[in-house]
Image (cartoon, rainbow, N blue to C red):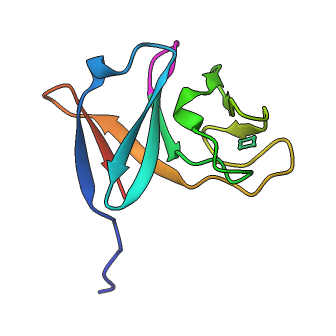
């Protein structure tokens, strides 16, 4: 049988710490991860540092699909990490809310 690399889970604290429609940055295992709480429900987690010039993506504006970097307005798909404005992609992380209401990221 082949072992499957699944990553480690990291509890980041109560989902209530993230206002609906906004993001928060967390230090996870040496990397900055931005977790966004979508207005329609659900979470998205991507690398928090914009590949363009290091902008703070957790402070960006989001809609149901994308985040816009606050520094120079490059746009990234929150589900795939791909930039729709020609930048390198963001890393995407699995994220969910556990039974205690905490955000859990797999990295
Ligand atoms: S740093 Fe994000 S768009 Fe320039």
Q: Residue at x 68, y 29 (%)?
A: 70
Q: Residue furthest right?
A: 86
Relative image position of residue 14 (x, y in whole percent): 22, 26
Q: Position of residue 73 (x, y in %)?
A: 78, 32
Residue stretch rendered in magenta on the structure: 37-42
Residue 20 vertical placement versus 51 (above, below): above
- In the rendered image, residue 40 lying in the magenta stretch gets the answer yes
Question: Quadrant of the rendered structure where residue 102 is?
Answer: top left
Q: Residue at x 78, y 38 (%)?
A: 74
Q: Relative to 104, is 22 on the left or the right?
A: right
Q: Toward which corner of the image does residue 88 lie, by quadrant?
A: bottom right
Residue 50, position as x, y percentages in the image: 65, 47
At horizontal 29% and vertical 24% (from top left) the residue drawn is: 15
Residue 28 forms part of the magenta stretch? no
| Left or right placement of residue 34 versus residue 91 in this view | left
Q: Quadrant of the N terminus?
A: bottom left
Camera-side residue of 63 and 61: 61
**x, y percent for residue 46:** 52, 45
Q: Is residue 41 above or below residue 8?
A: above
Q: Quadrant of ligand 1?
A: top right
Q: Residue furthest bottom?
A: 1
Figure quadrant of the C terminus: bottom left
Q: Is residue 99 above or below residue 106?
A: above
């Amino acid at each position: 049988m082949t072992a499957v690399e699944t990553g480690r889970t990291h509890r980041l604290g109560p989902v209530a710490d993230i206002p609906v429609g906004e993001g928060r940055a967390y230090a996870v295992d040496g990397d900055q991860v931005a977790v966004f709480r979508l207005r329609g429900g659900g979470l998205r987690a991507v690398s928090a540092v914009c590949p363009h010039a290091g902008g703070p993506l957790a402070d960006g504006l989001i809609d149901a699909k994308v985040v816009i970097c606050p520094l120079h307005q490059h746009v990234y798909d929150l589900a795939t990490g791909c930039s729709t404005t020609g930048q390198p992609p963001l890393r995407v992380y699995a994220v969910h809310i556990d039974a205690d209401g905490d955000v859990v990221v797999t990295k």
